[in-house]
Amino acid sequence: MSSNLATLLEQTCARISPPSSEAHATARRRLDTLTKPLGSLGRLEDIAAQWVSIRQQRFGDPIHKAVYIFAADHGIAAEGVSAYPSEVTHQMVLNFLADGAAINVLARQHHAALHVVDVGVDADMSGVVSLLHRKVARGTRNMLHEAAMSADDLQAALCVGIELAMEAAAAGYNLIAIGEMGIGNTTSATAITCALTGASVEDATGRGTGVDDSVRAHKAQVIQAVLERHFSHHLHSHPLDVLRSVGGFEIAAMVGMTLGAASQGVAVLCDGFISMAAAALAVAIAPNTHGYLIAGHQSAEPGHLLLLDHLGLSPLLSLNMRLGEGTGAVLAMPIVESAVALYTRMATFASAGVSEASG
């Protein structure tokens, strides 16, 4: 493991302080003075207070949004756990770059800058323009037989995310969504979920790309075997060991970006199951990261609900989606913007000359 890479991770985690409790309390007091019955904006008030606690003195700055899609392949796909072949990862990356995917439509609709990152696609992408080239390797190893990645490759993938988070903050983005593309990654996310939460494989395994009952049952058997191989003698594995053993390069990069964003005071809108698995690992590595997370939506994957409960996060949307790509997080962006707009633009009872409630 490179000492420089390890130092970057350590320094990033050391810079993550919890969002300001003082700013949060100040925001709550202001919300109670706005021209509305107390608490009548519901979750929007929670979001506004969280935004102020994260951004502190910069809470009134314009919201600049971006979505980062991390793409990588998984060796476990060789075990027939997906409805699609591995080459779809490469093909979908090209579709993102050609502006043809759901995330392209939603990012354009909601004015979020879209960045596509190759962190481990099993194809030669070297000549592809408009792609962020950060490839660690051409896919992970098959975690059914060995650890998904080496320690050096894990550190490299984490640092891809950390460095891109630093660049995002420097570019002025203060609200980022993190998405992914990688055939086989719901299998990886399920193994991570079971390792972190102790949930059973049966409860955590979903249909991923839309597999039928027989493939889902096979997928669950593969995940059980993976867990027995890597964790049967380690009931409380370190989150970095979990990530190295059963993760993916895109998941590691998402962990790094989540940590990096928190270290820079940037709010993170989590997407679906894969994104939440990365967020849960980030919190396990650096607990102060938790306060920077906003759950964009609840997907149809059962493991996603397990992770939301594990982290104590309540999703803004529930649309029965299971697409990934950052789509659910981008759909939630206008809700965050609305909450902040209400907080910063509504009149107070005093400024509007409106009588407050009695008693």
Image: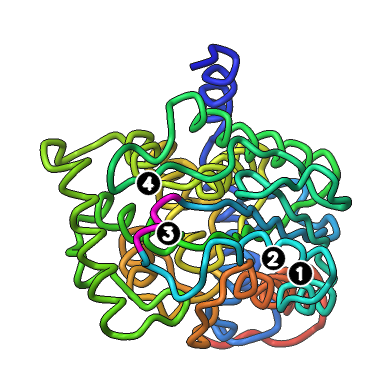
Residue 56, which numbered label? none
**Which residue in the protein does label 3 denote?**
77
Which numbered disc flags the more N-terminal residue, 1 or 3? Answer: 3
For the residues labelled 1 and 2, say whether their Cβ atoms are less than 8 Å apart. Answer: yes
Residue 95, which numbered label? 1
Image coordinates of residue 94 in percent, x first then y, are 77, 63
Image coordinates of residue 172 in percent, x first then y, are 84, 47
Which numbered disc flags the more N-terminal residue, 2 or 4? Answer: 2
Q: Amino acid at mark 4?
A: Asn
Q: Main SS of the magenta segment?
A: helix
Whether residue 16 sits left or right of residue 130 in the image: it is left
Which tag is nearer the camera, tag 1 or tag 3? 3
Give the CA separation, mark 1 to mark 2.
Answer: 6 Å
User: Which residues make up the magenta segment?
Assistant: 75-79
Identify the residue at horizontal 22%, vertical 72% (top origin).
203
Give the CA separation, mark 4 to mark 1.
Answer: 26 Å
**What SS does tag 1 mark?**
helix
Q: Amino acid at mark 2?
A: Gln
Image position of 356 with respect to 116: above or below: below
**What SS does tag 4 mark?**
loop
Give the class, few, some or many, for how many residues have Cα within 10 Å of label 1's Cα (few <14, many ≥20): some
Which tag is nearer the camera, tag 1 or tag 2? 2
Q: Is residue 357 visible?
A: yes
**Which residue in the protein does label 2 denote?**
91
Q: How many numbered discs, if any?
A: 4
**Which residue in the protein does label 4 denote?**
142
Q: Residue most toward the left?
A: 233
Image position of 5 with respect to 83: above or below: above
Q: Is residue 229 magenta?
A: no
